[in-house]
Amino acid sequence: MPLCLFSGDDEMMMMSDADEKLSERRHLLAECGMDTYIDDQSDAARQQERHYYLLSELQALVKDLPSSFQQRLSYTTLSDLAQALIDGTVYEIVQGLLDIQHLTEKNLYNQRQKLHSEHRALKQDLVRKHKQALQTCKSHNLAVLKTNQRAETEALDQRVKEEQRMMDEKVVAEMDQKVLDQQNMLEKAGVPGFYITTNPQEVMMQMNLLELVLKLQQKETVSGSLP
């Protein structure tokens, strides 16, 4: 018959002591943060894997840009951009800014179309008024009438031209402000390459960066790999 080191109540007592010690160790690990260490390591690995994936995708998308912009997009810039995209927050910010821009563009377009319609109606009314006046005008007053009508037409043309100019300036000013708003928001979000500037080359570079982000977002949406 094989011998047991512990038997009966003594064995049960020792097992109970071992359980207590194991519980104490677990408690100590939790107090030291060791229970979250493994989770943190796992999260870090997942983030590193996603960063590598995003960087690879960005490097592939960059090849579609003009060579002059490719040269300016260094590995570090693309790596920083990939880092900013990891949790998907930047995607949401970019989409929100894009939606606001589309609404602004639609609103300005509608305003311009409304103004154009008003001008067309004014011109049609003036032509009708002139036609009626010519039909009832006495011959000896015809020259004076035509001179007055020509002056009215020129005045209306000048008014239309001026109002169109003011509308165009308004459109440009509002779109310029939207660019500044977008630059400011993306800079605050920590997206590399974005800061407030009116330099045409820098603005074009930022547009290319946004194009990369939107293309990558679309690809991740289709593949279902968004975080």
Image (cartoon, rainbow, N blue to C red):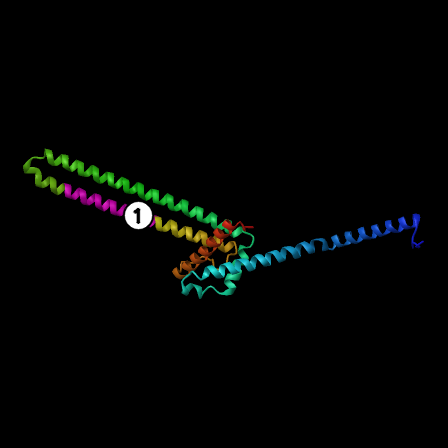
Instruction: Name which quarter of the figure residue 154 lies in.
Output: top left
Q: Which of these two is toward me, 81 or 122?
A: 81
**According to the image, label 1 marks what residue?**
166
Q: Main secondary structure of the magenta part?
A: helix
Check the image and name the residue furthest to the left.
Answer: 140
Residue 157 position, x and y percent, is 21, 45
Instruction: Name which quarter of the figure residue 138 lies in.
Output: top left
Instruction: Say how many tags the image has.
Output: 1
The secondary structure type at the circle numbered 1 is helix
Judge whether residue 211 is colored magenta: no
Residue 135 position, x and y percent, is 11, 34
Q: Which of these two is toward me, 64 or 211?
A: 64
The magenta-colored residue range is 149-170
Instruction: Name the side, left or right, on which 50 lies relative to 149.
Output: right
Residue type at the position of mark 1: Met
Check the image and name the residue furthest to the bottom.
Answer: 71
Residue at 52 percent of width and 60 percent of height = 56
Residue at 65 percent of width and 55 percent of height = 42
